[in-house]
Amino acid sequence: MPAPKKPIAVQQKVLARTGEMDDTQLPYLFMDSLIANYHSELAEAQIIMGYSYSWKPNRDGRIILATVSLFNDFERQMHSKDVKILLNYNYWHNPQTNDDNRRALIDHQLSHPRPIMDKDLAIPSRNDMGMIKYYLRAHDIEDFNDVVSRWGIWMIDMEKSAEVMAAAWAKEQKEREARSTEELAEDAPDAGSLEEELEEELEGEPDEVVTYSR
């Protein structure tokens, strides 16, 4: 008698809204907050989220963290959803992925869908069923690191992106320095114990120094 076949593993799973305020709803909680603060043009968009379990690194060693796509008019009539965002389950639940990483990932995906605007009325265009028409906006910059290293900021679009990234990096450096200063202040030894701790350090050096990278 042949062995029973294993059921085919689900590759993608819809993340249902429950209205609860728990970790299972974190993607939707982040998304709602981001739309309210940064993506008001998506206030009417019906967005469904889900997880993908099957993404593997490509030939270049890069792995998909998320995707975003639009439903066509037929699909929108079936389930009244406009946009689908799929998150890499393993990345989302990786202990090294923090909430800022998760917010940035969803913010990135929300930056793609945009309503098609009526040029005369300056309002979102709608189809004959009253549904807003959307398109997927491309990234602000597309290039290879090697090309940038050889030719620098060679596209006009890159200039603004370079300014934004430089400002973001400067802000990140200041925040890191502030955190380091606070940590040093918290860890500063009392004057009475300083001599004792120095004597302990001189007794022996560590056998191993481990450096972790994000």
Image: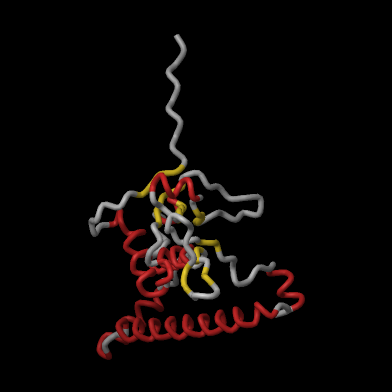
The answer, for residue 32, to whether it is visible in the render is yes
Residue found at the far top of this picture:
1
Residue 213: x %, y % from top left = 50, 66
Q: Is residue 180 above or below residue 54?
A: below
Q: Is residue 209 visible?
A: no
Where, by quadrant of the figure, is residue 29 drawn?
bottom left
The location of residue 53, given as percent across then percent down, is 46, 45
Q: How many marks?
A: 0
In the depicted structure, whether residue 149 falls above or below residue 97: below
Q: Is residue 47 above or below residue 178?
A: above
Question: Of all residues shown, which one is farthest toward the right?
Answer: 150
In the image, 44 versus 161, the foreground residue is 44
Res 20 quadrant in image: bottom left
User: Where is the N terminus found, in terms of image quarters?
Assistant: top left
- Residue in the picture at 49% in, 50% down: 73
Res 198 quadrant in image: bottom left
Q: In the displayed structure, would residue 13 be above or below residue 101?
A: above
Q: Residue 51 placed where, x, y %?
A: 42, 49
Of residues 174 and 78, which is closer to you in this image? 78
How far across and down, in percent of the image, does residue 157 sit?
65, 77
Q: Is residue 136 left or right of residue 35?
A: right
Say which residue appears at 43% left-offset and 54% top-offset: 129
